[in-house]
């Protein structure tokens, strides 16, 4: 998993509440267990017209938000089913940070396990971030995980809270497998001890 330290980029404003995981990545894309290639299906029912062409009215299709890597979204983002394909699709598209007032628990946890930083802010802070995001490519946000700050294009910043363990994992690029590998020496030593004590096992 890639480390998350500091991210500076364009923030796309998604003025929708209760965005569920089926909206993030519709069910027809769930046939794969690969984490790559799902970016094309991200918000597909909003991004594409019935004939398959881009919907120019959807925020991620607008020229000023091409390459956006931060998403500013409405309340209760990631609700609905627990599909891990939702953060996979966001990450494959290039989104490394999602900012909202609230997230569904399973989606929130899945983000951390896949290298995405979900940030909870107050309604007032979200409104200010929407204002920044509405300015397009000329208004970049900087998310600093170490200092737990979001800095806007005019230099103003807000702080956010995050669980220390989750912060540690993101800063060091540790998913569940990575956490196990960190303890590889202790695991090997324990197995050697068991083999010596119980050679018949």
Image: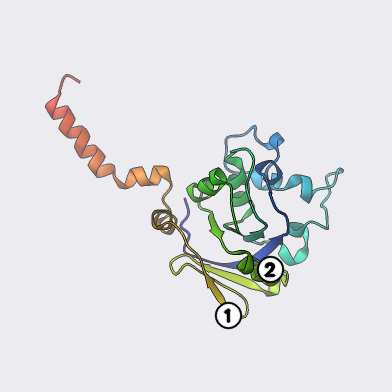
Residue 182 sits above or below residue 29 on the image = below
Judged from the image, the secondary structure of the residue bearing numbered disc 2 is helix
Q: Is residue 194 left or right of residue 87?
A: left
In the displayed image of the protein, which residue is found farthest to the bottom? 154
Judged from the image, the secondary structure of the residue bearing numbered disc 1 is loop
Which mark, residue 81? none
Which residue bears the numbered disc 1?
155
Q: Position of residue 15 (x, y in %)?
A: 73, 59
In the displayed image of the protein, which residue is found farthest to the top? 200
Q: Position of residue 110 (x, y in %)?
A: 52, 45
Residue 184 sits above or below residue 95 on the image = above
How are the residues colored? Answer: rainbow
**Where the C terminus falls, by quadrant?**
top left
Q: Could you tell me which residue is drawn at 47 percent across and 50 percent down? A: 1
Q: Is residue 67 left or right of residue 165?
A: right
Q: Could you tell me which residue is drawn at 18 percent across and 33 percent down? A: 192
Q: Could you tell me which residue is drawn at 78 percent across and 49 percent down? A: 46
Please report whichever mark, 2 or 1, sits nearer to the chain's N-terminal start: 2
Q: Position of residue 36 (x, y in %)?
A: 59, 44
In the displayed image of the protein, which residue is found farthest to the right? 51
Q: Could you tell me which residue is drawn at 65 percent across and 35 percent down? A: 30
Res 130 → quadrant: bottom right
Which residue bears the numbered disc 2?
133
Mark 1 residue crowding within 10 angstroms, few (<14) / some (14–19) / many (20+)? few
Label total for image? 2
Q: Position of residue 41 (x, y in %)?
A: 70, 44
Res 12 → quadrant: bottom right
Report the front residue among 78 and 63. 78
Mark 2 residue crowding within 10 angstroms, few (<14) / some (14–19) / many (20+)? many
Residue 20 sits above or below residue 73 on the image = above
In the displayed image of the protein, which residue is found farthest to the front? 123
């Amino acid at each position: 998993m890639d480390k998350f330290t500091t991210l500076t980029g364009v923030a796309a404003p998604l003025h929708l509440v209760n965005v569920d995981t089926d909206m993030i990545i519709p069910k027809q894309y769930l046939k794969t267990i690969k984490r790559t290639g799902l970016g094309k299906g991200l918000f597909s029912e909003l991004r594409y017209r019935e004939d398959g062409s881009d919907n120019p009215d959807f925020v991620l299709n607008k020229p000023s938000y091409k390459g956006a890597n931060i998403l500013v979204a409405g309340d209760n983002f990631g609700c609905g089913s627990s599909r891990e394909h939702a953060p996979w699709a966001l990450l494959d598209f290039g989104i490394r940070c999602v900012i909202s007032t609230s997230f569904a628990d399973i989606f929130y946890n899945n983000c951390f396990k896949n290298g995405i930083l979900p940030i909870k802010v107050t309604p007032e802070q979200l409104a200010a971030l929407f204002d920044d995001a509405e300015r397009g490519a000329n208004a970049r946000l900087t998310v600093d995980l170490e200092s737990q700050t979001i800095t806007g294009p005019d230099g103003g910043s807000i702080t956010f809270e995050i669980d220390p363990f989750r912060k540690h994992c993101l800063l060091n690029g540790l998913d569940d497998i990575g956490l196990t590998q960190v303890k590889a020496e202790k695991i090997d030593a324990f197995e050697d001890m068991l083999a010596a004590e119980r050679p018949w096992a």
